[in-house]
Amino acid sequence: MRSPSPALLCPSQPHRPRSFAAREACRHAARLCALAVTLFLAAVCAVSSRAQQQNTEPPLLIKTEKAIEQRVPLPLYVSSQSKAAISPLRLRWDYASASSSMGDDVLVFRFPDTQEGAQLNVLKSQLWISALSSAIVWQEPWRASRWTVREIPEVDGPGVGVALSVGMIATASDVVFPKDTVIIGSLNPDTSLGPVNGMASRLDAAAAAGMKRVVIPNLQRFEKNAAGETVSIENYAKTLGLEIIFASDLLEATEKTLRCKLPAPPSTTSGNGYRGALWDYLNNQCSKEMNKLQTVAGTWQRNLDRLDKTGGPELKTLWRELFDNYDEGMDAYQAGLLYVSWGKLQMANAKWKAVQAWRNANLDFKTVDARATQLIARVRELMYKPPVDNNELHSGVCFAETHDWGYAINARLEGSQIFAQQAFHPRSTATEAQKELAITRMFTAVEETEYLVQSFEAYKELYPLVHKDDVAVYNRATVWLQQLIPTQIGASELFAQGLKHNANQLGNMILLDPRLSTYARVMEEIQKEWESRVSNALSMQSNTKIDHNVGWQPSGAYARPRSTNMNTAQGQLVAAAVKLSDTSRCLKWVNDYCEVSVLDHKYLKMGGYFDSARQEWVIPQQATLQAMTQYADVAARRGIAMAELIGLNTNILELVYERASYLRSSRRMDDKLEALRQFWRCALLGNMCWQLGYVPKASAMPAGPPPPSRIPPIDAPLPETTQAGTQQTQPGAGQLTSAQKPLPSFKSQVQDGILLAPAQPIPRTPVEDDIEPVVEEKSNAAVESAPMETVVPVLMESE
């Protein structure tokens, strides 16, 4: 047995020092252990943080199939009385499955406790605008949707649009609308939030109603008080104990209010995306216009001070506009903006024709007025005669663009005629100088229009260049049109009320705006067309034995339309508009709605005025206009992306986007406002096409309890499980939700008081072999045998 080591027996004896390599190995091992511990702790923290983030991440809003009802606070403001109030609106959402009697593609608003009247018309307008906007940001078309609206307050303005949109999304997704939150703001056509009147008064009402949070437009951080002082809205709200939340658009307002997420908007690579045959065609049109101008451009006297002064300042203005259009058209052509170049060069040729006509001008008022009347009738006739109208989206978009181009020509001519007729009226107090200005403007507009009217033939060639395959809309355009018309009328009534309230400030500026006078005439025709539809429906129901539960039923407060002094030309225009397909008329509605929206901002929200010295419009709030245009640009590209989702050839939308992008950089306020309108048109046209042509895809759902088999009757009290905020149920394994089932083949039938127009069968989307969706088709032989013209399909009901 070996003896123990002396070092163990004698602790006081020091250890023999280790070698250098041994010491380094120990240090390296210690560092590795420390690194391993650090990595382990970091991994644990990352997993914990990820789990915590998953638990705190806002949930995604998903549409429910349950019947949900809740109240949504609305911020009301009466401009005439300068009073505000917070009043709840009761919304009920019912989802109709494909086998229900309501049909699978119907969006209905019902007002069982309210009679027809001006206030209800205003609310209808706000509801439908809110429905369009909420469907856009949610990327969920309102298919198979029935809304019941009760406890309706007196809505006197557009400041409730955002609250209605968020309330609809919250109710349809089974999310409780916060009781201590109110949303104040109007909706622009691109779903951005617009300013409202009386913000301070609305905040006072919110504080008095016990609200804690207020969502307002990002563009309305400041407001002028009665003394003309600029006041911070956020600071004023703090004095009331309110938390202000700013939002730029409806998507942001929804997520901040409900603390939930919406789907990310689609993106697109838009901007001068047309090529091939369309590019060659536009290049050819530009070449034709340039060839006409280049032969005479060398003879132009560019020094305006040396021009013949016999024509007065109006001739000098005409020359200046000729030079500007020619130079801008040539620059746009070199930059590859062919659609912009074509429009500018056309206008330059029209200006040159007017300049030449000045040499032998006949400025007799009656002669020029008669020429203007004939031309206006000709332009209107061409505006409502598309070369192709197949009741599908490609032909509809082409018609909308052609109609918008003709509208601008007609507005200039008709506006100049109205101005001249006012000046030469027997009871007019216009001076001789004002009369001379009026007649020269009308003469110039007549000469320009005689040249521009020839371009309608060129626009007819666009359709075969962009048409690929028909994109059907089924019966949706027929159903939607009956709501869009009164919505447009309601929006116009709101605008007219604003003009009346600010009549003293506007003065004679209204007479100097040709687009306003033309829009007033268009709305008069739309109103008469609507009255004619209602009158015909009542007459046919009284002369034929039709079930009174079918079709449009007026309330007890309804009165037959009075006979109107509709002249022959107006009657022909109304008849021509009715002959258009429902798809084309829905897309024309986009043009009209964007027009009134720009006019509303121009006159009422941005404080615009006409500078008679410079003969142009001035917008004091240029920064606001620039911010709105910037957001509208983004929304326009999203609209193009939405149209691409349904297989639409977006070349026409690309043309609209190109023109808007060019105009936004102009120094003229009229061009900047037109850029905003064109961006809005592009956004809303794309989204309208998506909603009309959307076809859902069928897919299997994960296992879970089946959905409710019966939706409670509309007048029955809701059970506790259907109040907003309850847990949603999921379909069982291998089942399809109603929103994912293929659409049925619609026939001419009346379902739940609504006439569904005949449409071609919707192609079914292939699904897995083990899933066999069954769609029941209900028919009504009595209705199928009756002609469609016997009933006007109107969806808004008043019981």
Image (cartoon, rainbow, N blue to C red):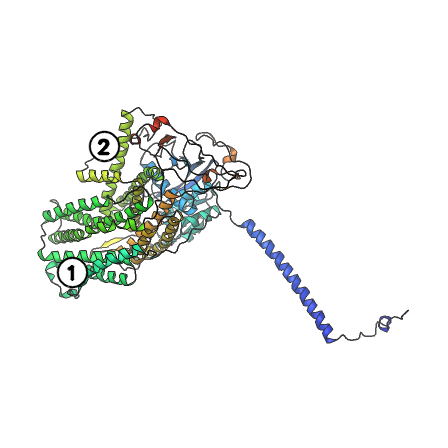
Disc 1 target residue: 316
How many residues crowd around disc 1 within 10 Å: few (fewer than 14), some, or many (20 or more)?
some
Residue situated in front as seen by the camera: 158 or 714: 714
Q: Indicate the secondary structure of the residue bearing disc 2.
A: loop
- Residue 620 in view here: no
Where the C terminus falls, by quadrant? top left
Three-letter amino acid code at the position of disc 1: Lys
Name, please, the residue furthest toward the top.
545
Assign the N terminus to one quadrant of the image.
Answer: bottom right
- On the rendered structure, is 357 left or right of 231? left
Please name the residue shown 72% across and 75% down the image. Answer: 20
Pointers 1 and 2 in contact (C-beta within 8 Å): no
Where is residue 311? Give x, y as percent.
11, 58
Query: Which residue is identified by label 2?
Result: 562
Q: Give how far across and how far down residue 767 sits, in percent.
A: 48, 41
Q: What residue type is labelled 2?
A: Arg
Task: Give x and y (percent) for residue 412.
Answer: 20, 50
